[in-house]
Amino acid sequence: MEEHRDDIGSRMGMWIFIFTELLLFGGLFLVYAIYRNKYSADFHTAAHELNAFLGALNTVILLVSSATAAMSITAIQKGNKKLALWLVGITIFMAFLFLVNKYFEWGHKIHLGIYPGSELLLKMEQGELLFFGLYYFMTGLHVFHIIVGMIILTVVMVKINSESINSHNFVLLENGALYWHLVDLIWIFLFPLLYLIT
Amino acid sequence: MENHKQQQDHITPYSTMLKVLVGLLFLTFVTITVTGLHLGAFTVAVALIIACVKGGIVITWFMHLKNETPIFRYMVFGVLLLYTLIIVITFFDYAFR
Amino acid sequence: METQKSHLNYIEDTQGRKGIFAWILSTDHKRIGILYLISITTFFLVGGLLGGLMRLELAAPGETVMDAQTYNGLFTVHGIIMIFMVVIPGLGAVFGNFFLPIMIGARDVAFPKLNLFSWYLYMTGALLAVYSQFAGTGAPDTGWTFYAPYSTDSSTNVIPAVFAAFVLGFSSILTGLNFIVTIHRMRAPGMTWFRMPLFPWSLYATAWIQVLATPIVGITLMMIVAERWFQIGFFDPALGGDPILYQHLFWIYSHPAVYIMILPAMGVISEIIPTFVKKAVFGYKAIALSSIAIAGVGYFVWGHHMYTSGMSGTARWFFSFLTFIVAVPSAIKVFNWVSTMYKGSIDVRTPFLYAASFIFLFMIGGLTGLVLGSLASDVHVHDTAFVVAHFHYIIFGGMGFSFFAAIHYWWPKMFGKMYNEFKANVAWLIVFIGFNVLYFPQFIIGIQGMPRRYFDYLPQFHTGHLISSIGAAILLTGIVMMIVNLMKSRKNGNPAGINPWGGVTLEWTVPTPPPVENFDEIPTITEHPYTFD
Amino acid sequence: MNFLQIFSGASNMVEGVDRSFVVIFGISLFFLIGITGVMVYFIIRYDKKRNPKATQIEGSNTLEIVWTVVPLVLVMVMFYYGYRGYAKMREVPDDAMNIKVIAYMWDWDFEYENGKVSKDLYLPIDKPIKLNLTSIDVVHSLYIPSFRVKEDAVPRKDNYLWFIPQMEGEYEVLCTEYCGLRHSFMGAKAIVMKQDNFNIWLADFTPVDSGTIKGLEILRANACIGCHSLDGSKLVGPSFQGLFGASRTVLVDGVEKSVIADEKYLIHSIKEPNAEVVKGYPANVMQSYTKLLTDEQITDVANYLKTLK
């Protein structure tokens, strides 16, 4: 039996998986839209509590990491293994920075007593409570995806190193990068909706 | 069936990726500035439109949708249409209560 | 690569694995199909038994064999098992896995390992669901719909049940993903879209729903979990949430889920009828495209489950309007199936009996659905036994009968043995009668005002309930007969041969049972899938 | 109850709903019988013994169009009748009498404009009634089959329905949205009477002296008596009658223990119902009322229970 390989098929599979992820977050965005519509004033007040600077910093981090992930494909196509490793490595490092940033952001909130189920939160207006509920749930789910993305990219790095991903067969890197762009894509919407629209 | 071999002809140059990155960073800057202006109801619209543009750029270049076979584009379009309709139809309830 | 062509079939060829590992580690789509067949049948029997116990309780008014809490747990678990573990995966996971690659001339699905992984996810979800019955604070009692805020308040095992549904949903997504890529990328040379048989067509439409609707219910159920663990209040009005929004999100998935069940069922019927009528299916394109139309429009009718929820008037008439529109493609299919029989040469065998009764039962289910789609009449029968009868006619009369049709149709190909046809026909008759005796009275008591999910009822509904319970016993007898007959054939049945029914799709050209590789050489397709000479 | 009660006219909504039924059932029955008949005829007529050779027919675009358009027209007719019957349900006359309906696990309270609260729905004949529905816990649904009306009672949301009762008599009021343990027992009566009798009934309310039975009010408002009867009958939980001072066998972490139901025990059981569950009753059915009741209210309840000998 000849080696069966279908790169377009693999990427198609990844894209379809990305669709499901988009709709997963899509459900949350729908909930956000409904409650924002219902409690616009409360959302307004609550959004002021978020640190737009940290949010912007994380946006920049993710955009850069997305670019390096995309460039790593170019590198591998050109047969430049070393550069590809570096670029994927930078992507993972950026992801790590994002998490550190998020850690401080969440830590600060929790320190202030704003976390799901906290007494302070339960005393707030219902809309604010929902805003913070959504904030933690959406960014939490996003962080989960960041971590999954980091694991995938680490596997990809190992495979580049062992040259099972090479200039002739790099669909795995493409799919890993696709997943990483999805993480970026979601953040592109999370950032203005949570941090900016005050 | 279609081409089972990896297409070698779509190597996106590094410079394109860097240009795209600069564009995205610029748009991020624009969003932050515009939302800081307190344009009222427009803020949401502007922020969302810019987010959509950024998303479109990521999908087109970073995710290489530009170089994929057309079926990928139909699928992306279909999914986005579906999601838009779901939102619109749900608001048929909330907007008219 | 191959030195010697293997002539073993997929059952004999263990590919070097021993015992049970030859099954649970095999990535062969046919073996995975059999794994699903065994697990789904098992859960079907469990779910059916739970349903039987409910009918026993309802045979007479008042508390008879169980208390209200047990009853509420029973209908919840019956729902979860039957919906998430039987009818949603049912046809796709069993017959789709086994026959989709063969019918489009492929050696396997696009991602065989992922396919096996889906089965493991399915089993994980299933075991979680079973676990939720016995552990901790008792069986969940929310109904399979998990309506908030009851589901966020109930002290029973809601969380494991919700996780079970989530994991099962994930399994369903991966199966759908696999099928889409398989159909796009792996059709045999010459098999254009309109040379593809109708069962793969219906699986294609279904797969898109699985992929695009399931995530919404996944995230919704996770929100329920977050609400219970962290007091976030997404849907709890006391914390600002909106229970109606939960219903929207839930039905955005769960209504299309009905089409996940019924579309493959329609696909099976579209395969069986031409084979036994010996005639090309009437209006092939209309049937194929109506599957896509049903899948497409079917996304946007979820609100018809919520006419009395306090939704806005605009939303109500909009959903009602679209609901009526989606009825049309189903009608088109029925007309085409019946027209296929015109001037045919009909061989009335067991699968055909099930297929013909499918058409009858599906019509009753579909037409009573119109009563529920209409704004005025729905107000009266919403959440009554009428709804229960309606969706059992669709799900059991539709998907269930189609599953029975499929198992009798493809059994000889899957196992190489013929079952006893006389016994199979007797079992069909009993199942058909039992089914109608069980569910038809529920239409009547529903119109009379018998609400659903009632542990106890007013005396005027006794006769209806009693007849219904008797029907359950008849139905159960028929199903047991059917299964025993099929199982016996594994030992005593006559060899089936390559093409026992005279079918023309590709699965009837490969050896019986098929070899691991399906085809020695991938065929080239030159004509329409239903070409009878 | 006579079958279907088509056009029985118990309320003004019956006509619209039943017309919609008749239209849909009529068309459906025609197609069901017609198609089944044709199918059975084909199966017999074109059996392989009678017709050994099938005639291949690919399809017909004309037919496809016909059986797309005809059902389309018919379902639009059905939609129209459904819409017409429904539109009436949303147009409440200005002079309608408002009754507030409060649903809770597992009973209904009907509150009239003059403040009278009733467990059953008393209605004057031939007068538009608007029921304003709400719930204090989970989603319920008010259903009066004979009147062909139904609408959910959703917590913190104001839903409504309206109708004109047109026939004197007693009708069932049911809950059709699953709401937990005693969902099927959450019933009431709708009693339609002459305007004069209704006026007498409505005027006759002796405001209850809240001093003595404050506890009872709390029990009612929190639906305690849905599970704990006041008359000794066994419901989900133990009856309140004769509870105070009685000796009970309870399970503490699976170990049997005998306690006297004194005030301390009663208060403890309201705050932590699952700590000491009376033997023979299910655990984890009741939740803590610490957050729902103040300490003062709990004491009121305990005091009331003392009076139930």
Image (cartoon, rainbow, N blue to C red):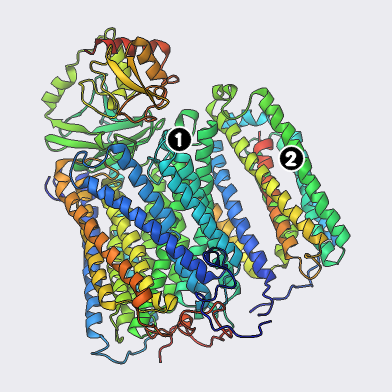
- Does D71 appear above or below A115? below
Report the residue at 40% width, 41% height from top.
Answer: C140
* Secondary element at tag 1: helix
Q: Residue at x 39, y 74 (%)?
A: C411
Left or right of B12 in this view: D24: left
Q: Nearer the viewer, residue D82 or D157?
A: D157
**Residue B57 or residue C164, whichever sits in front:** C164
| Type of amino acid at the residue the image marks with label 1 | Thr
| Chain of the residue displaying label 2 | A
- Residue at the spot of label 2: A99
Percent across and percent down for residue C141 are 37, 40
Residue C152's mark?
Answer: 1
Within 10 Å of disc 1 (Cα), the crowding (few <14, some 14-19, many 20+) is many
Give the left or right position of residue C441, taking residue A43 as reference: left
Q: Amino acid at mark 2?
A: Leu
Distance from disc 1 to disc 2, alpha carbons, whole Å, reads: 31 Å
The picture places residue A48, in percent across and down from the top left corner, at 67, 29
Front residue of A156/A196: it is A156
Label 2: which secondary element: helix
Image quadrant containing the C terminus of chain C: bottom left
Corner quadrant of residue C531: bottom left
